[in-house]
Image (tube, rainbow, N blue to C red):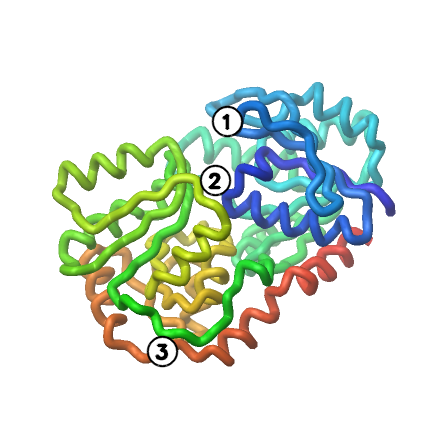
Amino acid sequence: MNKIVIVTTTFYPDLGWWELYMLNLAKELAKTYDVTVLCISLHKGVKDCIIEWVKINYLPKWFFLGKIFPSIIALFCKIKKINPDVIYSSSPGIEDFWLVVMNNLFLRKKLIMTYHAMHDQTKWRLRWMTAMYLICVLPFYDSIIVTTKKYYDILKKRGIKNIHNIPCGVASDRLKLWNFNKENKKELLFVWVLDENHRYKNLKTLLDAMVLLEGYHLTVVGGGALKDKYQQYCLDNNINGVDFLWAITDEELSLCYKKANTFILPSNSSLEGFWIVLLEALGNWCKIITGELAWWSFLVRENPQFWFLYDGTVKDLVDKIIRLENGYSLDQEHISQYLSQYNWSNITKKILDTLN
């Protein structure tokens, strides 16, 4: 095996958490193999580039069912020209349906994917897409990587084979493992995409909680179509102490982590995947509050010193935030040891085992 093509909807410089996962994976794979990423960009005028030996080719975009994805024609032509040994996709995405068709009819390559999480099942079109994905896509992949035991069990129960449970990695340069005192114990941080597909992250619950939190300050980091609506919601309901930051650099995000005492991801959905942002928050000395039903709640269940789970209500979220103010400090040595298992070089070795 010499050449790997990674197919994903969006990639650098559009860095959400799926994109960050694939960027770090591509960098690690490029240390050994010839890696090309095929994707689209949400930014105008972005040109093909190379980042740490990873070649990034931006393709024209198509639209279907309210989703964007790389042009199927351009995707086929690029893959045919590169002639890779492995096609690796970041899933679920509409382009995966076409990858299966193209591969079965013409390409005949090894197909690998990381299946991050199911779509929001409250919408009929996304439930339909998930059902079709389970029937028409997953059975045709040679290896399927999931980042949580929950999704391993879900896919196994539905008869999918060749599943490997390998957690997310976190890049060492995004961790600032030092022992310092947070200056303001009332500084809160939320980081995620603010769009229709991520309403279940429950940012509105956190904003409602701010009404009852005297003297607290919340920084919301994330772009998306709903940012203006969340800002207007704060104005309409006299919610103070909230700052919204749109597109920021890694350095600026690092400062947000350093400033915050508590990282809050209020999602309480059992269909959540395993998100890198929680590991980054821990590695930057932030205490954590998240929903007790979210899959990643095991981080706190197994390590109660990481702090609290809440039951999904505004009242309980407020109570947990206030209780943190006078809580004890995090154990730096324990966090360092815990996060070492998520080092990207170790994660990539496990993924390479599936590629080989």
Decide which of tag 1 and tag 2 comes sooner along the chain.
Answer: 1
Q: In terms of secondary structure, where does tag 3 sit?
A: loop
Helix or strand or loop: what does disc 1 sit on? strand
Residue at (33, 54) in percent of width and height: 266
> Front-most of 203 and 65?
203
**Residue occupied by mark 1:** 67
Q: Percent position (x, y) of residue 191?
A: 40, 50
Mark 1 crowd level (few <14, some 14–19, many ≥20, 10 Å Cα)? few
Labels 1 & 2 near each other (Cβ < 8 A):
no
Residue 140 visible in image:
no
Mark in front: 3 vs 2: 3
Write down the residue under mark 2: 119
Disc with the residue nearer the chain's start (3 vs 2): 2
Picture quarter containing residue 185?
bottom left
> Distance between the Cα atoms at labels 3 and 2?
37 Å
- Specify which label sits upstream in the sequence, 1 or 3: 1
Residue depth check, mark 1 versus mark 3: number of the one nearer the observer:
3
Real-space CA distance between mark 1 and mark 2, rounded to the nearest whole angstrom:
12 Å
In this orientation, does residue 192 appear?
yes
In the rendered image, residue 87, in percent from the top left (x then y), is placed at 75, 39
Amino acid at dot 2: His
Q: What residue type is labelled 3?
A: Ser
Q: Which residue is drawn at 54% across and 74% down?
A: 336
Instruction: Identify whether 212 is placed above or below 60.
Output: below
* Nearer mark to the viewer, of 1 and 2: 1
Q: Say what amino acid the circle numbered 1 marks.
A: Lys
Q: Which residue is drawn at 65% across and 60% down?
A: 344
The image quarter in which residue 331 lies: bottom left
Mark number, residue 329: 3
The relative height of residue 38 versus residue 326 in the rendered view (above or below) is: above
